Amino acid sequence: MSLALPTTALAIAARNVIDAELEAPLRNHSLRSFLFGRALAAAQGLRAGRDYDEELMYLICALHDIGLADAADGDQRFEVDGADYAAEFLEGRGVTDERVDIVWDAIAAHSSGLCFSPVYRRRRPAAIWIAVEGIGADIGGAPDTLAPDFADEVHAAFPRLGGIRALADAIAAQAIAKPHKALPGSLPGEIVRLRHPELVPTWNDIVGANGWKD
């Protein structure tokens, strides 16, 4: 399986963005996610250009954590900030078709279980769920579905450098600085709750504070 990355103008521009804006552990995670996603798709008999748009899948993977970069750090969850940034990135390069919404949808929802739903897979383009499968493989590991030699080659090209613990540290640091970005039930909320439970309200806290006196 090749380690080659897409070389379209958009793909190169996205790589330049993550090279400039993301720390190495997050950047490498994004690129490994693409390579793992493409390999998992191939193992399912899915071919780029026939079954999914490889450039689109790459853009999703490359930019899915851009919300953790200072350049995209707004006042929403990092996934939504990142989705907004990615949409502006595409629009700023003349992309105004459905690809903008596809990338936005994928990045905004990538940390939820929604993308793994069979219904979601039927209703949304394959580039989304292939990208999310690649992201999930890099987070949870996929020793039974990725050829060991290929995984070793990917890790040699794009080392883990702390891996997903470094990703969690980045999510936590951003959310601790802006607690409203760690909504209860969200990935940032769960990471912060495990590390600083006093910063994230529980379900009982939310119900107890509602205006209906439930």
Image (cartoon, rainbow, N blue to C red):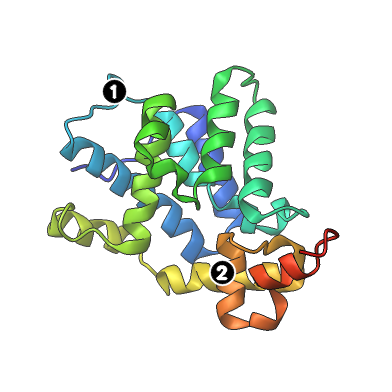
- The tag on residue 211 is none
Query: Picture coordinates of residue 38 (x, y %)?
Result: 29, 40
Q: Secondary structure at mark 2?
A: helix
In the rendered image, the vertical position of residue 152 relative to residue 46, given as above or below: below
Looking at the image, residue 112 sits to the left or right of residue 148; the answer is right
Instruction: Return the disc, 1 or 2, that comes first in the chain's sequence.
Output: 1
Residue under circle 2? Answer: 190
Residue receiving disc 1: 51
Between marks 1 and 2 in the image, the one whose residue lies nearer the viewer:
2
Is residue 32 depicted above or below 9 in this figure? below
Q: Residue at x 51, y 28 (%)?
A: 9
Q: For the point 16% across and 31% down, which residue is it?
A: 45
Contact between marks 1 and 2 (CB within 8 A): the answer is: no
Three-letter amino acid code of the residue under disc 1 = Asp
Front residue (pair 188, 7): 188
User: In the drawing, does residue 44 fall left or right of residue 201?
Assistant: left
The extreme right residue here reads 211
Q: Position of residue 25 (x, y in %)?
A: 47, 66
Q: Residues within 10 Å of mark 1 (few under 14, many from 20)?
A: few
Q: Quadrant of residue 148?
A: bottom left
Is 210 rendered above or below residue 64? Answer: below
Q: Is residue 171 visible?
A: no
Residue at horizontal 64%, vertical 64%?
A: 184
* Amino acid type shown at disc 2: Glu
Where's the C terminus, which quadrant?
Answer: bottom right
Residue pictured at 21% horizontal, 62% vertical: 152
